[in-house]
Image: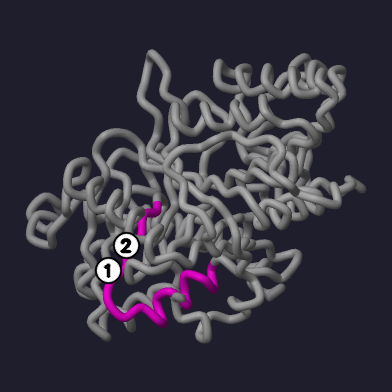
Amino acid sequence: MFQRATLKGASAAYSSHNTIKLVQGGGEYFDLLERMISSARYSIHLQVYIYDEDDTGRRIATALLAAASRGVKVYVLVDGYASKNLSGEFIDMLLNAGINFRRFEPIFKSKKFYFGRRLHHKVVVTDVFHGLVGGLNISDRYNDTPASVAWLDWALYAEGTVAESLARVCIRRFKSRIPIRETSIDDTPLRISGVEKDSDVRVRINDWVDRKREITRSYLEMLKVATSHIVIMSPYFLPGEHMRRRIRQAAGRGVKIKVIQTGISDIVMSKYAERYLYRWLFRNKVEIFEYQKTVLHGKIAVCDSRWMTVGSYNVNNLSAYASIELNLNVDSVTFARKTEKRLEEIMQHECIQITEEAYNRGTHVVEHVLQKMAYYSLRMILFIFTFYFKQKE
């Protein structure tokens, strides 16, 4: 097992006898999500940051409505800010069908002001046995459509004992008394191919209200105990001081660290800020790869070909201190190696490696100034937004 003794609380947190599969975003993800909803017989919990009222959103809504008509108890929770554009007609359609729908609300808000944590996690649980945790929202941009290719993203499908833990997370977040069936026997088989059985999985949460920084600690522990190599895929990669210190220490021990970032960003300011950190990464012998096919949105890391984590957590202070995040950690050599192989293939065939020489040659003085301005502006925004939350630790 992956350094169980050094990971805080790890031995108590992992659950065994789970069947898992890494799922890529786009058609693969939404086909599986629709199958899970269509196969559900008792309950569905869907919690997501962004739910758009587009073709993908309507497709999933149709499956949820059909489930409700079969008598399945359906609970949907979306972030009040990111999903604020859902129409009243759309929400009424769900409510009138018997679907339990709620918006996650911040600490303070008005028509022009929104302050507080956001529900950034993305999770689906059906029949307290099938779970799907990742970084994908319900929107066309995360799906393969005739007009465009999906953003690159990941989710972990897990069936077994860990799904009950996920269901309890969803119920607590929904803030309602929802019964859990006494048994979680798989009487709704999905017959997923390419799975790994008898896997050890644990749920990790970041939520400052509950004083939980489990995902952040998983990353910090990963960097602390790594002996060989680490691959991190993360958009909006702006590690805070503590994380950078651990990266520097790991690199100093000879750990080879590769970071996959997006080359095509949906947030231009964030990409400029990330590139400002490239010189620091070069100094610490971190290899940088920029994904080229489309926007990269996946959040995943593999350590020493033995352990991995995947979910909604970005490596920056917003995820570390302010947003509600959810990841699944997997302690499995076989699964970690398969995941690492997929990431290596992506780096080789779908990324450009950014070398220090190429970066210096291609970055002019004006562009470097813009990167610096973007970095410190974004850092100030994150500092203001997360300062209060840091004081609550």
**What kind of residue is marked 1?**
Ile
Asked if residue 370 shows in the view, the reply is no
| Residue 128 position in % (x across, y down) | 74, 46
In the image shown, does 259 or 281 lie closer to the viewer? 259
In the rendered view, does 85 fall on the left or right side of 239? right
**What kind of residue is marked 2?**
Val
139 above or below 247? above
| Residue at 72% over, 24% down | 64
In the image shown, does 183 or 29 lie closer to the viewer? 183
Mark 2 to mark 1: distance in Å? 6 Å
- Is label 2 in a helix, a strand or a loop? strand
| Residue at 59% over, 27% down | 35
Magenta range is: 216-234
133 above or below 210? above
Q: Are marks 2 and 1 in contact (CB under 8 Å)?
A: yes
Q: Name the residue that disc number 2 marks.
A: 231
In the rendered view, does 79 fall on the left or right side of 11? right
Give the image's coloring scheme.
one colour
133 above or below 94? below
